[in-house]
Structure formats: C-alpha cells, structure tokens
Image (tube, helix red, strand yellow):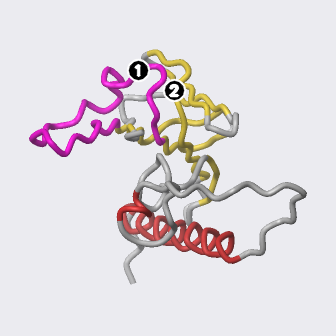
Amino acid sequence: MARPTRKMQLAGAAVVLAALVGGGVTYLATAPAAQSTASAAPSAAAPKAGHGKAAKTAHAGGPGMLGKVEHGEFTTASAAVMQVQHGAITAMDTGSLTVRSVDGYTASYTITPNTAVRPARNKAAAPTPGPAPGDLSQLHTGDTVQVMATKTDGGATATRIAPVKT
C-alpha cells in the first residue's frame, strides 16, 4: 500500500480537528451550567445556536471549522504541533505578527515567504487574487485575524493568516 501524501495527512488532521471541535462544542452546549449567585437577563438580540444566519453571526470568527475557537493547539498524525488563534493584531513587521485574543492570550508568530495570507472577503466586489505569500500589506494593527501556525521549541511560524470580518 502506498504511503499517504502530505495533503492526505493534512486532510486527515483537519477531519480529526473538526470532530474534536464539534464534539467539544456539543459537550459544552449540553453540559449543565455552573450555579451562580446572580443571573443576567437573556438578550433578545442574541443569536440562537443552531443553523442558518443566527449560527453564522454567533461569533466574530464566523462559520466554519474554527469559527468559535479563540486559541489552542493540536498535534497532527505526523507529530507536528499546530497552534490556532483568533484575535486582534497588536504588532507587526515584515518578519513577525503579534495577536491578542479576547481573553488576553497573546502570541507572536514568525512570518516567512511561505506564510499564506488570505485576502479580506468582500462579497460585493469581484474576486481578486490574494496577496503573495508572506505579504502582510493588506493587514493592519487592530485588524481581527485567524492564524494557523506550526509550533516548535523556538516559537511558532505562521502557515496561514486570514482576516476575519467583525
């Protein structure tokens, strides 16, 4: 039998991550809430969990596999440790990017020529090609992004950066 390709390994890791995230979200949604001495009145404008437009607007991260993840790590089948983070850019230059999540977690990422930088989405405009790999010119301090990185002993190297519509 042929050895699995890198793409097949990454696809398998993505499926496992989706299952873990989905299972975690399901567990959290069904787990009994902790008791509190004070209770807040529910907001009438708050989106409801589930499918459709309300689910897509429930978090600034938007829909998708990592839409509700603030930050975390996982290990792929090839033993690579991956780091994901959703947050605001607090500092950046040509070789690095620092992101702070809503809960205060801050991480810095090395940017290489291989870092994929996704273009900002604009459904009203015609599709345009994205920036060149490693080109941060479309990103600015304060922008909300989702970062996928490979973690090593020396730090984390961003593999993908995607702007998030807030």
**Residue drawn at (16%, 37%) of the image:** 129
Badge 1 amino acid: His
- Closer to us: 117 or 133: 117
Image quarter of the N terminus: bottom left
Secondary element under disc 1, as helix, strand or loop, is: loop
State the extent of the magenta-drawn residues as a range. 117-146
Residue 121 in magenta? yes
Q: Which residue is mark 2?
A: 89
**Residue drawn at (63%, 38%) of the image:** 102
Give yes or no for contact between labels 2 and 1 (Cβ–Cβ under 8 Å): yes
Badge 2 amino acid: Ile
Quadrant assignment, res 10: bottom left
Secondary element under disc 2, as helix, strand or loop, is: strand
Image coordinates for residue 3, horizontal then vertical, percent = 41, 73
Q: Which residue is mark 1?
A: 140
Q: Judge from the rendering whether residue 122 lies leftward or rightward of residue 127; answer left or right.
A: right
Image coordinates for residue 157, horizontal then vertical, percent = 53, 35
